[in-house]
Amino acid sequence: MSKLKACPFCGENPPDDSHTLTDGGFKYGAVVCGCGAVGPDTRTDYKEWPHWKTAALAEWNRRAIPEGYALVPVDQLKKIHRDLDACQKLIWANMRGCDPAYYEDAQASLAHIEAMLAAAQEVE
C-alpha cells in the first residue's frame, strides 16, 4: 500500500499502523490521525488489524484532499474575495487603455469564489 495522504484537518500524514475500532466493538475500524481525525469506517470482519489494514488505508486515501488542492479557511477565502473585488472595481474605474480581459478574468474568479463560499455555508 502506498503512503497515506495528508489529513484534511491538520495536514499531517498519519502512520499507516494508526487505527481504531469505530463501533465500540469489532465490526468496523478506521485509520486515525494524530490530531484525532478518524477515517471512514472499514469492515473488519471481526479480524485483527493486518487483515483489514489495506482496505482502511485505501478508504483514508479516498477521503483525503486530492493532490494539487488545499484546504482553505473560509475567512481566508472571504479576504481573497474582498481583495479581488476591490482590484476589479479599480480596474473598471480606470479602464482607459486597459485590456478588458483583466476585468473579465476578475469577474470569473469572483464568481468561482462566491460558489465556494456558498458551498461552505451549506456545510455549516
Image: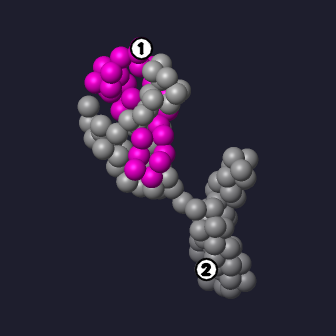
* Residue 39 colored in magenta in the image: yes
Q: What residue is drawn where x is 61% and y is 80%?
A: 98
Residue type at tag 2? Cys
Label 1 crowd bin: few (<14), some (14–19), many (20+), radius 10 Å: few
Q: Under tag 2, what secondary structure?
A: loop
Q: Nearer the viewer, residue 24 or 94?
A: 24
x, y percent for residue 118:
72, 53
* Residue 31 colored in magenta in the image: no
Q: Which mark is residue 106?
A: none
Q: Are marks 1 and 2 in contact (CB under 8 Å)?
A: no
Is 122 above or below relative to 75?
above
Q: What residue is drawn where x is 42% and y is 34%?
A: 20
Where is mark 1, residue-wise? 45
Q: What residue is drawn where x is 28% and y is 24%?
A: 50
Q: Nearer the viewer, residue 88 or 57?
A: 57
Is 44 above or below relative to 75?
above
Residue 55 appears in which quarter of the rendering?
top left
Residue 81 appears in which quarter of the rendering?
bottom right
Is 32 above or below relative to 76?
above
Label 2 crowd bin: few (<14), some (14–19), many (20+), radius 10 Å: few
Q: What residue is drawn where x is 41% and y is 55%?
A: 11
- Of the 4 image quadrants, the one containing the N terminus is top left
In the displayed structure image, the side of residue 74 where residue 41 appears, left or right = left
Q: Nearer the viewer, residue 67 or 63?
A: 63
Q: Under tag 1, what secondary structure?
A: loop
**Which span is picked out in magenta?**
32-58
x, y percent for residue 45:
41, 14
Q: Nearer the viewer, residue 62 or 117?
A: 62
Confirm whether residue 73 shows in the render. yes
Where is mark 2, residue-wise? 98
Q: Mark 1 against mark 2, which lies toward the viewer? A: 1
Disc with the residue nearer the chain's start (1 vs 2): 1
